Image: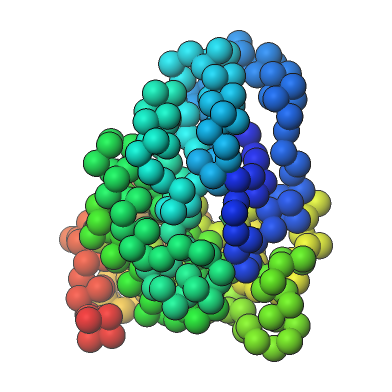
Amino acid sequence: MILPIFLPNIGCKYRCKFCNQFEMTGEKIPSLYDLKLLFENFKDHNPEEVAFYGGTFTGIPVEKQIEYLELVKKYFPNVPIRISTRPDEINEEVINILEKYNVKTVELGIQSMYNEVLEASLRGHTVKDNIKAIEELLSKNFVVSAHLMIGLPNDSFEKDFDSLKKLIELNVKFFRIHPTIVFKNTQLEKDFILGKYRPLKIEEAVDICSEQLILAYAKKVKIIRLGYFVPESQKNQIVAGPYHPSFGDLVKAKAIRKLIEKLGIKKVIYPKKFESWFFSYGNKNIKVKRIPSEYDFKFDDYTLPQVSELYLKERKEKYG
Ligand code: SF4
């Protein structure tokens, strides 16, 4: 069990064009007193991890970071901690604090590996910062979970695919990928109203992410989240963009369909828990023999990484 604490936009020195975490989540920053009450209630539940999500944890003043981390240590000694931050807020001092307080996983907002996309999205950091942060964190044995967004201003299908590829080459193993949604009270909303920004259509977003997912299967890295979770209370804050409550399932079904149809696969064996990928979201009528099983995926004689590699080879002329 993960004990999540959400700190919307805390420590952010820039407001990225697409972001307003208060509107997106409906959360408020809890006081230390609120956290004490929460921890009191959870102290007998033995959480496996305490996670500070949202904002830029390492961008808040050091004394405040230490207050949060000390509180966790007091209630949950030895429980690993996860924090969220951005690449230009990682430095030696910060790394020493994170190590001292048992932070094991860093959710790192990369968003793109293209400077023109980062700049147009008002991120305030560069690809060089991304690489430096990853190299510093990885060399210190943190688990890095890199966040990418697709459909940002100045973005393209190729840049989105390539951003993931570049991060895999840097040895990142975990990813969260979010399609850009236009939320109320963001700069992106203003651009959208003025006709300066066109959000992706849902089919475009699913298409891009399905290619990224196939790349992840081929390279044996994990995309642990596809698409935003928007609580029911905040859905009226969405102005435009490719939001779907089951976005991840749409993407997985599309990736499976591409693998089967593009490679002319005749028979699939799949673990029963993944049945919906083969029967739902447009896949009911694909012409393939489906065999549920206790075992791992098989596409004819290929494993999932093998069939994904083969698919990418066939598409090589497109991606280089
Ligand atoms: S995207 Fe991240 S860094 Fe940018 S404003 Fe939002 S929380 Fe802060």
Q: Give the answer, above or below, for where 198 lies relative to 119.
A: below
Q: Give the answer, above or below, for where 183 lies relative to 135.
A: below
Residue at point 81% right, 62% down? 236
Q: Is residue 212 left or right of residue 202?
A: left
Q: Is residue 311 left or right of residue 226?
A: left
Quadrant housing residue 246: bottom right
Residue 119 placed where, x, y %?
Answer: 50, 73
Residue at point 77% right, 66% down? 184
Q: Which quadrant, please, contains the C terminus?
A: bottom left
Q: Answer yes or no: is residue 207 visible.
A: no
Seen from this angle, which residue lies furthest bottom?
A: 195
Report how many numbered discs are placed on residues in the image.
0
Quadrant housing residue 164: bottom left
Q: Front-most of 237 and 271?
A: 237
Quadrant housing residue 98: top left
Q: Front-most of 247 and 262?
A: 247
Q: Is residue 270 left or right of residue 12?
A: left
Q: Front-most of 248 and 89?
A: 89
Residue 48 placed where, x, y %?
Answer: 48, 23
Residue at point 28% right, 36% down? 141
Tell me which image quadrant ligand 1 sits in.
bottom right
